[in-house]
Image (cartoon, rainbow, N blue to C red):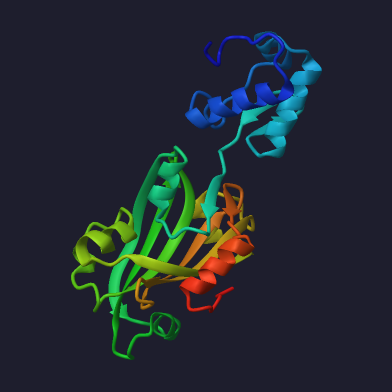
Amino acid sequence: MSSSEPRIGATATSVYEDLLQRIMSGVLLPGQRLGSERALAEEFWVSRSTLRQALRILEDGGAIRRVSGRGGGTFIKHVKINRDLSQVVGVPALLHSQGIASETRVISASLGPADEVSRVQLQLSEDATVLRLVRLRLADGSPISIENAVFPADRFPGIRDQTLSGSMYELLEAKYHTLPGEAVEQIEVLSATRYQAEVLDVAYGAPIMSIVRTTSDENGVPIEYSRDLFRGDRTRIVVRTPGRGEVTKAARDRNNVIVL
């Protein structure tokens, strides 16, 4: 039976799961208006009270928004991106894993001396040269984040001339045989400046998520220092916390030193 066929005896949970699957698969698109409660209740062969329970779950989860008044209704919202801090992965791979189309626009890419903060974070000498890369990330055609990343150019010669619109981690692995080993990230919520609001297509002063990251290679040598700004209304932070058994195993792997 297809998801579009009515299901006799459907519950609020099953209706919710059906509608959510349509949203995640692209059958229902962001901004699209759902049918009336009466039409949906008839489609799923449920009471309107059961349907309202399903819609309430979707609304609480941020999948839909309900607008009252003339011209109102129930509309599909942009699905939130799960930003898993337990994995060191590029944004394209992150979006792809969630079935979301990704696109990257390079705003600027330049070589120059490292500022003091970047020099300290990347453990560089005073005369070191870095690549400064600013990119706009889009999810399903909508802006999701602004990336401001710095890489040690002396370690990665010719990096400015590479294709910079894809995953930098994949580029570093393919071209320079360098893999990310660990990333230390600091997160805080800020208010969008006028420039940030314009680029990310949000209201001035809207909440945005700042993630400042220092990424090291498998030998613990820093290879990236960045500050990413994510739309607060499109991003959800996910953290996987190990249980006592995993912590104990990690301690053995690190010679009994646990980094918290």
Look at the image and tell me whether residue 17 can be seen.
Answer: yes
Q: Residue at x 37, y 46 (%)?
A: 103
Indicate left or right for 65 with 82 as reference.
Answer: right
Q: Tell me where residue 89 sits by quadrant.
A: bottom left
Look at the image and tell me whether residue 67 can be seen.
Answer: no
Q: Nearer the viewer, residue 57 or 221?
A: 221
Q: Quadrant of the C terminus?
A: bottom right
Relative height, residue 193 to residue 234 (above, below):
below
The percent coordinates of residue 172 (x first, y second) are 27, 64
Q: Residue at x 48, y 28 (%)?
A: 26
Q: Tell me where residue 141 sits by quadrant.
A: top left
The percent coordinates of residue 164 (x first, y second) are 28, 58
Indicate left or right for 30 with 105 as reference.
Answer: right
The percent coordinates of residue 200 (x first, y second) are 51, 52
The count of marks equals 0
Indicate left or right for 67 with 79 as reference.
Answer: right
Relative height, residue 124 to residue 152 (above, below):
below
Q: Residue at x 28, y 67 (%)?
A: 178
Q: Nearer the viewer, residue 27 or 10?
A: 10
Indicate left or right for 74 with 53 as reference.
Answer: left
